[in-house]
Amino acid sequence: MKKFIYLFVASLLFVSGVQAQTNTNVNLEELDAYFSKMVQDWDLPSASIGIIKDGELIFKGNYGVKEVGEKEQPNENTLYAIASNSKAFTSAIIGMLVQEGKLDWNDKVKKHLPYFAMYDDWVSEHITIRDILSHRVGLGTFSGDNIWYKSNISSKEIIERIQYVPQAYEFRAGYGYSNLMYITAGEIIKTVTGKTWAENVKERILEPLDMDRTIATLGELKVKGNYATPHARKDDKNYVIPWVNWDNVGATGGIISSVEDMSKWMIFNMNHGIHKGDTLLTKDTRNMVWRPHTNHYVDQTKKNDFNKHFNAYALGWGISDYHGKLRIGHTGGYDGMITAVTLIPEENLGVVVLTNGVKSPIMAATYYALDQFMGVETKDWSALHLERTNKYHKGDTRILDRQAKREIGTKPTIELKNMLGAYGSKLGGTISISEKNKVLTLAFEDAPLLTATLTHWHHNVWELHWNHPQAWFSFGTIKINTDNNLKVIGFDFDVPNDDFFFEELKPFKE
């Protein structure tokens, strides 16, 4: 593990300059100091924060180092993966295609992707573009993400497996955040335009908005340079992990950008789709992508921190009220990076927070900045969220509970040779167990980065030791299953985490 080196520089010359140029009573030097302490308190490798006010990027705060153990600091042009903040770009492109008459918001998905299928034939026939962009299709949040995560299969192949993802609630009767549906939207864009999602992003948004540092494919990262390094966390310490290629799922989370470039995107949106007099998004499109489509529960009998009365998902954006003002925003989680974009259009105010760690105060930074500029009573959001986060992690005993139940001294009742071979998964493809030089290995044919070494845990259960760094999960096991004649028929995963549900894979012996 490399030694941590945190360098916190306040950039006071910059802050003093912009403070004199803006009509705000906010003390930007104090705001800068707050963010600097926040990054240190959270043990975050780095953060780049931008605040947009009245069409200008008035604050650029950069803290920490781009990679632990190194000395180089980030700046407003440093690139971070914005992950699911990419969804708003996808819905904007769909809106442009509607404006051009190439799509309709209520088009059936099957009109453009005849092979598209869901858990139910009727739903498959009736699901629309608006449905897939608003997370109301009947799938559970994150369900099926093991189809695409770290996979090398195409978007079309991913979509062909969606039919095997289990139904979680009635069609259009609830909310389930689905990355799979945005991958589907990206393939519709490709089918209609004859160009990839990444090409459409570049031609329709990045180039017109002069977002010349932003990229939509990982292959351009080293060419651009000046990028942050992703970090995972183990034993309360950050460690470097490699960038992971999300090109095949770009429409759900593939954009890599900077504070400077994201400020242009945010200003464009607060200007309702008009850039330098050029209307890229019409009034109808703006209203459609910012219209509540799927509502979330808000307890009207209790006060909340934001004086919130409604909360909903629009199309690629989350939408709610914040102390009496409309709030538009989204967050994003990429392997080793977490980000947030928030707009208060009535105040012509926006905050972007880009970080390169998995323990991240993105919303604490956002709320603190919004409160300062909106003149509402300010809380120490960093301290509150840090306490809450630490409490959650301390209370998460899923792994410890499993480890406590291990029975030492047991032996498997299944011969090793009977475990070996290929297993099929409707969601995950072929998963094999092999043995070489007395080392047992589990390998995903479509996702080599999920390869793991197996060691005996107890009975017919084997522990997974991931051969590559994993940001969102660590401990895991598989249990070998047999029929009544003791023939191996498959195995079950148990990988406790909040993001990727290995238990859905259900591999069966081929």
Image: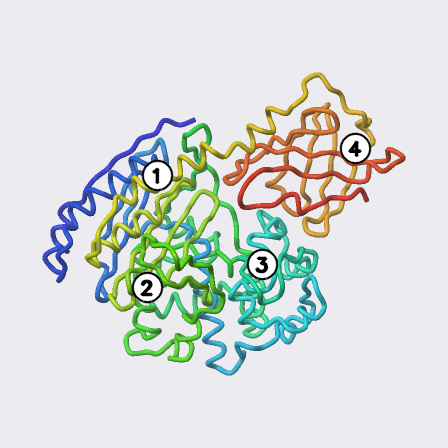
Labelled pair 4, 2 in contact (Cβ < 8 Å) = no
Q: Earlier in the sequence, mark 3 or mark 2?
A: 3
Q: Earlier in the sequence, mark 4 or mark 2?
A: 2
Q: CA distance from mark 3 to mark 1?
A: 31 Å
Q: CA distance from mark 4 to mark 2?
A: 53 Å
204 over 51 or under it: above or below = below
Of 354 and 123, nearer the camera is: 123
In the rendered structure, which amino acid carries the disc numbered 1? Leu
Q: Residue 485's spot in the image, x, y percent?
A: 90, 35
Quadrant of the drawing holding the N terminus: top left
The secondary structure type at the circle numbered 1 is helix
10 over 179 or under it: above or below = above
In the rendered image, which residue does mark 4 sit on?
419
Q: CA distance from mark 4 to mark 1?
A: 45 Å
In the rendered structure, which amino acid carries the disc numbered 4? Met
In the rendered image, which residue does mark 1 sit on?
386
Labelled pair 3, 2 in contact (Cβ < 8 Å) = no
The secondary structure type at the circle numbered 2 is helix
In the rendered image, which residue does mark 3 sit on?
180
Q: Earlier in the sequence, mark 3 or mark 4?
A: 3
**Marker disc for residue 266:** 2
Q: Residue 257's spot in the image, x, y percent?
A: 38, 55
In the rendered structure, which amino acid carries the disc numbered 2? Met
Residue at coordinates 58% horizontally, 38% vertically from top-left? 496
The secondary structure type at the circle numbered 4 is helix
Of 297 and 239, nearer the camera is: 297
